[in-house]
Amino acid sequence: MIKNEAVDYGIWGDLVTFFDLCYALPMSSKHLLITGGAGYIGSHQVRYLLARGVRVTVIDNLSQGARDFVPSEATFYKGDVSDSHLLEHIFAKDKIDGVIHFAGASCVAPSVTDPLHYYQNNVFGTMALLKVMKQCGIRHLVFSSSAAVYGDPLSIPIPEDHPLRPVSPYGWTKRMIEQILADCERAYGLKYVALRYFNAAGAIEDGTLGESHVPESHLIPLVLTAVRQRTDVSIYGDDYPTRDGTCVRDFVHVMDLADAHWMAFQYLVKGGESTAINLGSGKGYSVREIIQMVEKITGKIVLTRLEERRAGDVSELVADSSLARQKLHWSPRLGLEKILVSAWNWETQR
Ligand SMILES: NC(=O)c1ccc[n+]([C@@H]2O[C@H](COP(=O)([O-])OP(=O)(O)OC[C@H]3O[C@@H](n4cnc5c(N)ncnc54)[C@H](O)[C@@H]3O)[C@@H](O)[C@H]2O)c1
């Protein structure tokens, strides 16, 4: 039932959960709104859900991503998540059961040089979305948070209860949104999972969809494009306190992420408590190790250029993913080799 008037979630929220548990239609009949569904991770999520028979509506302002990344089976709205009228229209037209919220500006370095854009787009955009969700009685949200909420970690691997000390405005936007979600849960009964992913990477196996940011700032596509175009790739700093001096990151296959989002939504529908959960493999690779692995997989030499450290980069980010196993029964199935092979497949076909 679509509810356009303001809803008090209290007791009603419990009844909805009971109803969902006892009588709800199968999960595949659910209808999800995917914000940022034309972007890298969002578009893979859309393909994943459509393949499972889930109905999908996408809203994306196309500041990144591409219209072509969204299959015609999904309903597409070009628009901004801060456009309350458009969101009200979408929620009134389709019976949306929940939202997976990917939309946001997503790079560390530009957030340092243009913080106001990041706070405006990410924090205000999410607040506008939450207001309309509350107004329309949509109570389940899966949110793209980030390992950037931890800042420079005190210990590795990083558990969810590690202090949150972001070092970039981007990380602060994610931390602020998590706080807003927690407050909305207390006040209105919103149920959410904030998924703190480490580094998303890889592509759909058939090479028809993959990573694409403009300008690209993520390591794996940068290295692969450099190999294909026979140019060099920048290494930002080799004096970090890591095993070879370059930054260490934990990479998760984008289709494993899609799996985790779907599991997180089901967890909420079944009455799971709101929470923040790390999504990572638990294994870190340095920039130089990634480059060596790319050379092995492509059979080509990677040309490199050493540059100064980038503002906002921390030395090492590796997830403790035990909570994801415990609460969502999720663990990544595709390791670094599968990530690089699929990403190379996309790089050579696009
Ligand atoms: N890529 C990663 O490794 C990574 C890691 C941690 C967290 N995240 C988070 O995951 C989410 C998706 O990341 P991605 O790599 O797919 O980025 P992306 O830039 O490819 O996708 C984001 C999409 O959101 C859209 N968008 C941005 N602001 C919007 C707005 N106000 N209204 C409507 N649409 C808007 C963009 O056009 C884009 O299509 C982001 O929130 C990002 O912060 C990504």
Image: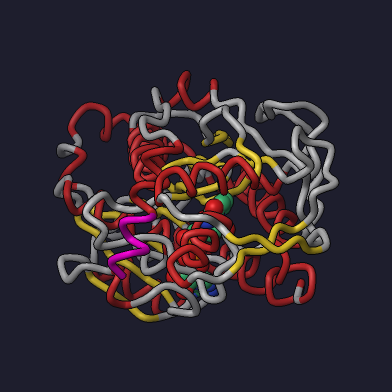
Q: Residue at x 52, y 36 (%)?
A: 279
State the residue in front, 23 or 289.
289
Residue 165 in percent (x, y) is at 81, 44
Asked if residue 338 is among those painted magenta in the image, a careful observer would answer no
State the residue in front, 234 or 251.
234
Does residue 229 sit above or below 329 in this rendering? below
The kind of secondary structure the magenta stretch mainly shows is helix
Q: Residue at x 70, y 69 (%)?
A: 119
Residue 222 in percent (x, y) is at 54, 63
Q: Is residue 1 visible?
A: no
Image quarter hosting the N terminus: bottom left
Asked if residue 346 is among those painted magenta in the image, a careful observer would answer yes
Does residue 121 sit above or below 209 in this rendering? below
Classify residue 5 by image quadrant.
bottom left
Q: Give the magenta part as a residue range.
A: 344-350
Residue 135 lies left or right of residue 319; in this view the side is left
Residue 41 lies left or right of residue 171; in this view the side is left
Does residue 26 sit above or below 246 in this rendering? above
Q: Residue at x 68, y 40 (%)?
A: 248
Residue 251 in percent (x, y) is at 52, 41
Q: Residue at x 50, y 70 (%)?
A: 230
Residue 211 in percent (x, y) is at 42, 61
Residue 79 lies left or right of residue 22; in this view the side is right
Image quarter hosting the C terminus: bottom left
